[in-house]
Amino acid sequence: MKKYDFSKIEKKWTETWRKERTYEPDFSVSRGKKFYNLMMFPYPSAEGLHVGNMYAFTGTDIYGRFKRMGGYDVFEPIGLDGFGIHSENYALKVGVHPAEQAKTSEERFYKQLEIVGNGFAWEERLETYDPEYYKFTQWLFTEMWRRGLAYRKKQPVNWCPSCKTVLSDEQAENGKCERCGSVVEKKDLEQWFFRITKYADKLLKNIETIDWSEKVKIAQRNWIGKSEGALLKFQITNDKSQINSESQSSKFEIEVFTTRPDTLFGATYLVVSPEHDLISSSQFSISNKEEVEKYVNEAKKKSDSDRTENKEKTGIELKGIKAINPANNEEVPIFVADYVLSGYGTGAIMAVPAHDARDFEFAKKFGLKIISVVSGGEEGILYEGSGPLINSAQFNGMNSEEAKEKITKHAGGTLHTQFRLRDWLISRQRYWGPPIPMIYCETCMKLGKGEQPDMPGWYAVPEKDLPVTLPFVKDFRPEGTGQSPLANIEEFYKTKCPSCGGDARRETDVSDTFLDSAWYYIGYLMRFGNWKLEIGNSSFAERMKAWLPVDMYIGGAEHSVLHLLYVRFIAMALHDAGYLDFEEPFPKFRAHGLLIKDGSKMSKSKGNVINPDDYVKNFGADAFRTYLMFLAPFEYGGDFRDQGILGITRFLDRVWKMGISSEFAEEREEEKDLEILVHQTVKKVTHDIEALQYNTAISAMMILLNEFEKQKKVSREHFKTLLLLLAPFAPFMTEELWQHVSLSNGKQSSIHRAQWPEYDPKKLEKDSFLIAVQINGKVRAEFEISKSMDPKEIEAMACALPQIGKFLDGKDIKKIIHVPGRLLNIVL
RNA sequence: GCCGAGGUGGCGAAACUGGCAGACGCACUAGCUUUAGGAGCUAGCACCGAAAGGUAUGCGGGUUCAAAUCCCGCCCUCGGCACCA
């Protein structure tokens, strides 16, 4: 008997599938049954594919193969997200130019991805560093600009001292750089931003309409951070003792944002952030100015994480000035403290120590007045809930919820919705990315001319001049000067103004990597032959209409507020610009779990990284794939154990043996119950794959095989059903066996284009089965009954059983509960 | 602190709508076979107990004929957010 020679068979089918274009969809017809099956494309930054990537790809590929067999024309493309800081950092580490490293990685990644048996549409692959690709990344930037969604602004931004570039808020995770983990600093710099906040409300609302993993939806909701409240104005006065002239008093106002305007009567002081305008204002004489400045400077020096790590609240009163509470016209002191953030709301708060934990802590430390205005808590203790108001003049007795609007009105404030989300900082002072396609003209600026009224001197590179090619720069190292290495290349930045034709300067920053990946799912549809299709081209528009949005998207949850938020935003902008007829690019998204090894995350420093190549070489791609899917539910992830793969190897070997033996039974030779099990298995595997519960699908197939082996012979049809069910998991071996067991003379078409088996609902139940008999809820016996039996008859039979009879002896049966087909519970 | 997901044999994990807890697999044990290699086959395998039987799904209560599953109160682990007013 021939042993299964996986390396030979895998090689053969890889070549055949490629040659026969088995996994290429038919774009020439617009068919209703399309299925766009997408996985997050990888960063080719490391030495090769990580087993975690392999896990994600395999899980997605199984789903795609399942859909293809279900009659869909499946589009499952693959590409590389090889532009950007992660690839550049890797190139820096190994000392190779990123453009060269890209070629090496490309070859290695694609080879690995094919070896493991993924059914990709190889002809449509793309790389984000391809000028034909980033031409459109740049076009996208100019489109955002034209639509008023891109702007330049100076403000405190996140700066990674190690990567020597600015970062977006999303990339400064807990005050640390998403790439290298360095502590992020704050710098005042002029940068490019995308106005994602314009879509904050839509990004939030649409979450309700999309079918995504719940934890990702929650992460996005939290990140967008909608709060409903009010903006209230507090007038500022100098202390009576210090008023010098009439004009200096009472013109300046501080606006605060609060979610609890109902507690305004309890606002006993005001706090401004160290960056607040009030501090530098010359309108007031702050008597302890020196002291205040010292505090402010120290606070500004601290990084965000330093500020938050120090739990003890600090601050200092601005002496000589007071604020007036608009509810009751009482004077309250003003403090500056770094627990108030400049980037949120108005950068100033009204402090209500009786009903806010932070204010409470601060007030205790500085001995400030604490006035309860909401009843419900204990006297003198912090209470953050709602309830009837007290100490609030005419509002006493009113419920706090109702009072929110009333008190806002009374104080002359306005109701306001505040988002936590801030605009997307898009520029990077690095080399390996798409140059931002903008031109700055000094002459036009002086004349006040420009494409956008509020940004004189700035022009987008005209579409005909795209792409702005990234020049080959030998010394691509970031310098930390606040400028990209491109700023040293005169031939690059010297250009002509698209408006006046005079000398002008190109933008030398490149765009964030996440812009590259914000539209790649569209890019795959452009890649026919040689990027012949362009945005605005009508046949491309048709293709987008036919294939978008993506039907199933799978990827890591770590991109919850990075890629997955940006890509939604860009789709919304393109939708509003009329290019897309949907707002949500991924109506269905599932986050796969993480693979761990020996109980901890895989990392090189721990030495527990799994090299997928070794396993494919030793056990074959089919066994490796199937094992990855068997070890735990796909959406949970799990612990990779070397020994576990042996169980799968045995299983596949047994399938091979049975298939190769060529001894199949006539159908009528089989036991009838076997047919029922086949139908049950088809049902279970179909359901489990649809739910991404691959582990239980595999165990169902194991049960079927175990039963097959107990039979003397199994019919060819039943064996073929098992092959079909197994095909998405073990594509190579099932293909080989499919050809072998098919009776047709000559060439048989691929199993991966065969029809997924169906089950007959009438053939799911056996005629007779075991039923359990319980006494007071404890199982005491079981016996066989037939489907047609009368309940009374079953009860009588149960009581007659010897194991049951001894319990019944001399006792009254209170009642009998009969769950048909399951059990009988006799209550004594 | 807040939000989310979890906690079941030696291990990875199953369990429909509340209905026989531990499917399937790994490891292990015994036997057979052996071309002695991570091979194959058969049987066993939650715990206590000689057995009858009893006890078991993080802990403590509750509802129910019946709870891993529902309710209340705790504990622990992992993931995310974190002075967001």
Image (tube, rainbow, N blue to C red):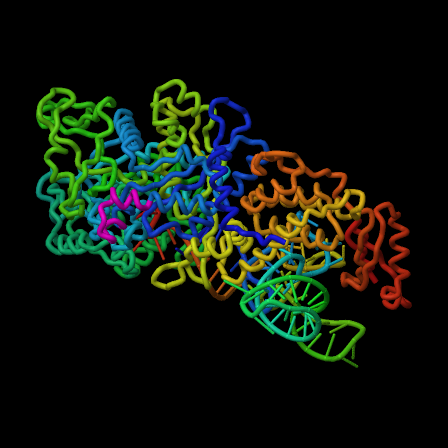
Magenta span main SS: helix
User: Which quadrant of the figure has residue A597?
Assistant: bottom left
Magenta extent? A90-105
Seen in the picture, residue A322 relative to A35 is either above or below; the reply is below
Which of the image's four quarters has the N terminus of chain A? bottom right
> Going 50% across and 46% down the picture, which residue do you hit?
A10
Depth check: give the residue in front, A381 or A813: A813
- Residue A353 position, x and y percent, is 33, 54
Q: Could you say where residue A361 lies in the image, as x and y percent from the top left? A: 32, 58
For the C terminus of chain A, give its image quadrant: bottom right
The front one of B1 and A350 is: B1
Residue A504 is covered by the magenta coloring: no
- How far across and down, in percent of the image, does residue A768 sit? 82, 50
Going 21% across and 39% down the picture, which residue do you hit?
A253
Q: Can the viewer see residue A588 in this picture?
A: no
Examine the image and state in which quarter residue A608 appears: bottom left
Task: Decide which of A662, A352 is in the foreground and name it.
Answer: A662
**In which image quadrant can residue A224 be found?**
top left
Magenta-span inclusion, residue A93: yes
Q: Can you say whether A527 is above or below A399 in the image?
A: above
The residue positioned 32% from the left and 35% from the top of the image is A196
Picture coordinates of residue A506, whole percent (x, y): 15, 31
Q: Is residue A654 left or right of residue A156?
A: right
